[in-house]
Structure formats: C-alpha cells, structure tokens
Image (cartoon, rainbow, N blue to C red):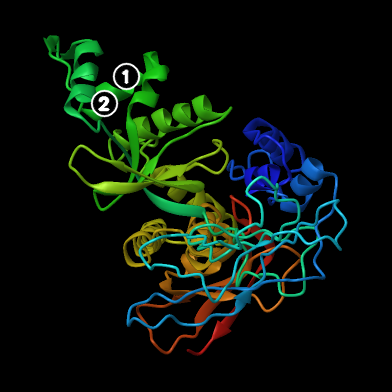
Amino acid sequence: LLLSLQRQRGEEPDPQKVRTALLKTALPCNLPENDQRPRCLVGEVNIAGAFTDLTGETMSESEELSTVEASGCGCDGTPETSPQLALSAEVTSAVDPTEAQPAVAASSTETAVAPAQPAEVSVTASEPQSTQAPVTATSISTSSVSTSNHQISAMSNTTANAITPSQPVQASGGDIIYVIGTLGYDFGTEARRDSFKQLMPPYEIEGTQVPANPYDARQMVDYLEANLSEAKSLIWTLNMELTPIYALEPSGSFARDVYAAFQELLSGEVQAEDSEEYIERVSIPGRLTGRTVKLFSGQVVPVVEPVSPRGIYGWKVNTLVSSALEAVRGQQAEADDEQMRKSLSSFLNRVYYDLRNLGQTSQDRALNFAATNAFQAAQTFSEAVAAGMELDSIVVQRSPFCRMDSDCWDVQLKFFDPESNRRAKKVFRFTIDVSDLIPVTLGEVRSWSSPY
C-alpha cells in the first residue's frame, strides 16, 4: 500500500525507502520484564508514522471513513457479519481540493473475500478523463484483511472503534513450568548414537575392557565428566515413569552451567539406592519454547528451556530422610526412627506417584514446589511425623489475598493417624507465589487440628 501511495503521488516506487520508514517509525517493544523470549525485534509497525515520514503529511480520520466487515467462515455459503473494523486511512494530496480529480476508492459492498484465501483487496477505480493525467487526489482504504495468527497493535492515532483483544497477547506465566521427574537422555538419530559410540573410550569392568555402550548411563556420566561440551549433542529428557514428557534444551549465558548440573544429577541417579549420593527425583524449572523435538523412538515431546541452574534440585532421598530425622529428634527425643523413615518415604511416594502432573498450570507448580520444599523442611511438621502420622491429602487453592503482580496459592497438607481414625487430623498450610520462574514461599507455615 505504501508503494502504491508513492506511485499515486507521482513518485517512483522505492521499496528501500518504505523499509527505512517502517523501521525508523516503529514503536518500542512492550514486553514483560521477565519475558526473555525474542518475540519482538525492532518494534511494532506504526502505519501513521510511516505515512508521515514518507509524505510529510498526517493521516486524516474525520472524512470518508470506509468500514471493512470481517466475513464469516463461508461454511454454509452465507457470510456472517462480525463487528466492523475501521482500518481505512484517507490520503489527501497537496493539490487544490476544488479541482475535479479522479478518485480511487474501495467499496466494502463490492469487495468479495473467498474463504480459501487469507486476504484479498478489491479496488474499483473510475476511468480518468485523460490517459495522460496523473492521479493526484486519492482515497485509499484497506479491504477485508484476515489476521488469523497476528494481533493488531493499537496505533497512536487509534479511533474509537479500534480492536481490543479478548485477552493479553502474552499471558503472564503461561509458558513457565516447574516439574518433578527423573533425568534421562536420548540421541534422536542412529548417526548421533554411533558418533558417541565412536568417541567414547572402552569401558573397563573388573579388569576387562569392553566396547563403549552409549546407552549405559554410568559410561555416559564418566564421558561427560571429561567432555562436558558433548552434553549439548544429547537430547536431555525429563521422564515420568520411564516416559519422556519434556526435552530439556539449555541456552544462553548459563547453558554450560546447566549442562554441568545435568551431568551431576545423572551421576547421582546411577548410584546404588542405599548410597547417600543417590538421587531419586529432580525438579526442573524452565520455559516452554513452543517447539518440539523427535526422539529416537519416534515420540515427539515439547522443548523446555532451563534458563539457569537456579532452581534445579536433585532429591537425595537418603540424605534428606536422615536430615529430617535429625530435625525431628531435636523436637521429639523419643521418636521412632523406623516409623519416621517409613512416614517420610510414604510422603515422597504419595507426592510423586499419586499427585504427578506436567507442572504447567499455576496449581501444579505450587503443588510440585510444596512437595519439594516440604520434604526438604520436614521440621515444619515434625510433630506429625514423630507421632507416626502419614500424609492424607494435599489441597491447592487460590489465596484470597496476594501481593501485587503475584500469583499466590494456599497449599494445605493434611496428615492422619493410620492406626486410629478417632484421632484429629493435623493440617499444615503455607502460601506459595508461582509468578516467577522459581516459586517462593510467603509467610510462615501455619498448623491446626481438624476433625475431618
């Protein structure tokens, strides 16, 4: 349209000049501070500014506004009428308006939009009196334009009938995840697998060297410890019940640190189950990229981008249980170690197997963080654990009040006595803010007894 405007003004169409005008007059990007995805490059298109830069004039909105009606799907042959969208801009020339000049106008009644075409512009022009007379006074208006995947930004000279989206283009926290699972890796293709087999050194077992096996996690841990840069060539996965649910793809300045954390977590997962360094679960915060990756098995999983090692934890179960027992002994000297260990293990299994989720919604992120934080800080419910009580339920509800620009949820952990149903249940409640990449606990843990 801007090139047509140049021609109608008697100028030679210059795409480079139009490009320069669009870049020069672009409006600044308006993205949330915590959004690190490059959704906006130079800025937002400013049609009014580009028009002024090219012509030295301003766009008039008071005369001959033509409306454009969005057509329906055309499924039954009868287009549906939707709210009118005013996208027209009248361009007036510097010539005396009293002179009779041919006009070019777009009529909404004469414009037909085929359902199969995303956009179509129909212009009806009156025949000029002389074939040599240049067109000097025109009225340009846009016709039916379908914007299926693009949001229309409000311009500085927006009229009263501008478009208001039904929801924000970028929902706050909509792409954040905080998920619990086990760490794994994949090769994607046979060639990538064979390249690792070729580069990995032979493995020695009881004095006997055997060929390298890329599927052996112990051999892979040793190889990555000496060649951390090779970690980027793997497809790291987060698994739930041996099923990959996410592909982890670190990027940015701290990508190497994240890969080092992955290598350390994988090293803990291959330890013996009775080892103090054994890691049973990991928690991963990150952002959904909107991309997918195909694994060696053919399964397609979404890609998650961990932005830094911050918030990546490994559940060293044996160490955590021992620490929790020490905390309980500090308050309950006569506590039964075996019973407490059983109660803590039951708590862990209940959270992982019964309350498992993908960690995408606010409720799921609050639940996963509550499980991680509560297990690591068992002293908060040491009284219930020392008495042999076990987890009954975890309820997540939106907090009735919250600080500004936060997403707060109340998490209630209810414990019961498996040996006596007449005993009151113990309830622990704390508030979690999940608006950031890493959830945080607000306030103190509160507790009370409940008959049900």
Q: Is there any visible trace of residue 314 in the rendered image? A: no
Q: The residue under label 2 is which amino acid type?
A: Arg
Q: The residue under label 1 is which amino acid type?
A: Asp
Count every numbered label the image shows and give the total: 2
The residue drawn where x is 66% and y is 46% is 2
Label 1 sits on a secondary structure element that is: helix
**What's the mark number on residue 218?**
2
Q: Is residue 92 left or right of residue 295?
A: right
In front: 341, or 163? Answer: 163
Label 2 sits on a secondary structure element that is: helix
Say which quarter of the image contains residue 270.
top left
Mark 2 in CB contact with mark 1 (< 8 angstroms)? yes
Q: Is there any visible trace of residue 87 in the rendered image? A: yes
Q: Position of residue 287 (x, y in %)?
A: 51, 48
Q: Is residue 268 above or below residue 385?
A: above
**What's the mark number on residue 222?**
1
Q: Position of residue 55 (x, y in %)?
A: 80, 44
Question: CA gap, disc 2 to disc 1?
Answer: 6 Å
